[in-house]
């Protein structure tokens, strides 16, 4: 029975290992396209505020020796190695220059619980292999990003948003819709020579909505005055 299970497991392990290698290769090839300052900023803005000091220090160490140094998503580290003097951070107690075995263990455990890092293999003499995640891959960071983005969304003035006469960006939409041609004489206009005319005059209850405005040359616009558009077109 064990032999049969082993035979089934072997091809599955090869497939999984192959998929991991493809993802790793893809990351290494695309990392050149990333702007590292942007990644650093996302860590400082969205991840670091969610970590305790030792957790943050260990993450920065792992990030520096994996993604920055080798463009690799994986790094093998040992608890004793991370605790050595001058490796990661000085103990906050001031009693030693490195971190205690327990402090490193606890920080790694918390980083795993927060899905910031993940074990990716067995432990050997050199330590344990971990997968290091970027903020955009970490759930707690994505939530923080969404919160900040929603807070930074510009407040829309409904009146301004519906105004296609006074708002420059909206005026252009009317010109583009009708190909910058005067509705009256058909003259081809430009964004510098085109004006907008109200189908239903403002003086008679018309508004500045998208459907109530059409491109018009200055000559035809001045001739029409506040007459209904149909009267002008009939003539």
Image (cartoon, helix red, strand yellow):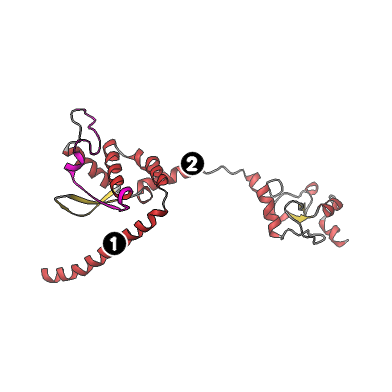
Tell me how far mark 2 sits from mark 1, CA to CA. Answer: 39 Å
Along the viewing direction, whichever of 161 and 55 lies nearer the viewer: 55
**Residue 18 in the image, given as x and y percentages of width and height:** 27, 65
Compared across the picture, whether 138 is left or right of 98 comes to right
Q: Is residue 114 left or right of residue 179?
A: left
Magenta-colored span: 68-94
Judge from the rendering whether residue 143 lies leftward or rightward of residue 88; answer left or right: right
Which of the pair 57/153 is nearer the observer?
A: 57
Q: Position of residue 100 (x, y in %)?
A: 17, 36
- Quadrant of residue 211 within the rendered picture: bottom right
| Label 2 environment density (alpha carbons within 10 Å; few <14, some 14–19, many ≥20) | few
Q: Residue under circle 1?
A: 21
Quarter of the image where the C terminus is located: bottom right
Residue 77 belongs to magenta span: yes
Residue beneath the point at 41% across and 42% down: 41
Which corner quadrant of the image does residue 47 belong to? top left
Q: What's the residue at 49%, 41% (across, down)? A: 151
Determine crowd level at label 1: few under 14, some 14-19, many 20+ residues with C-alpha closer than 10 A. Answer: few
- Residue 155, given in percent of the width and then of the height, sits at 56, 42
Q: Secondary structure under badge 1?
A: helix
Judged from the image, the secondary structure of the residue bearing numbered disc 2 is: helix
Q: Position of residue 129 (x, y in %)?
A: 22, 52
């Amino acid at each position: 029975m064990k032999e049969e299970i082993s035979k089934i497991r072997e091809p599955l392990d090869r497939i999984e290992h192959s998929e991991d290698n493809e993802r790793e290769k893809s990351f290494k090839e695309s990392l050149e396209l990333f702007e590292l300052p942007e990644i650093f900023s996302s860590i400082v803005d969205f991840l670091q505020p969610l970590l305790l000091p030792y957790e943050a220090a260990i993450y920065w160490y792992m990030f520096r020796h994996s993604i920055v140094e080798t463009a690799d998503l994986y790094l093998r580290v040992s608890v004793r190695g991370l605790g050595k003097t001058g490796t990661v951070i000085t103990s906050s107690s001031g009693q030693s220059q490195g971190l205690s075995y327990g402090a490193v263990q606890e920080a790694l455990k918390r980083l795993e619980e927060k899905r910031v890092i993940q074990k990716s293999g067995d432990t050997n003499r050199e330590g344990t292999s971990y997968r290091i995640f970027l903020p955009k891959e970490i759930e707690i960071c994505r939530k923080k990003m969404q919160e900040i983005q929603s807070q930074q969304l510009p407040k829309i003035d409904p009146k301004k948003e519906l105004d296609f006469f006074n708002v420059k960006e909206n005026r252009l939409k009317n010109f583009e819709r009708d190909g910058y041609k005067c509705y009256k004489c058909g003259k081809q206009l430009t964004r510098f020579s085109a004006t907008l005319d109200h189908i239903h005059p403002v003086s008679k209850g018309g508004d500045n909505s998208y459907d109530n405005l059409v491109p018009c040359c200055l000559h035809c616009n001045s001739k029409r005055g506040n007459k209904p558009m149909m009267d002008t077109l009939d003539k």
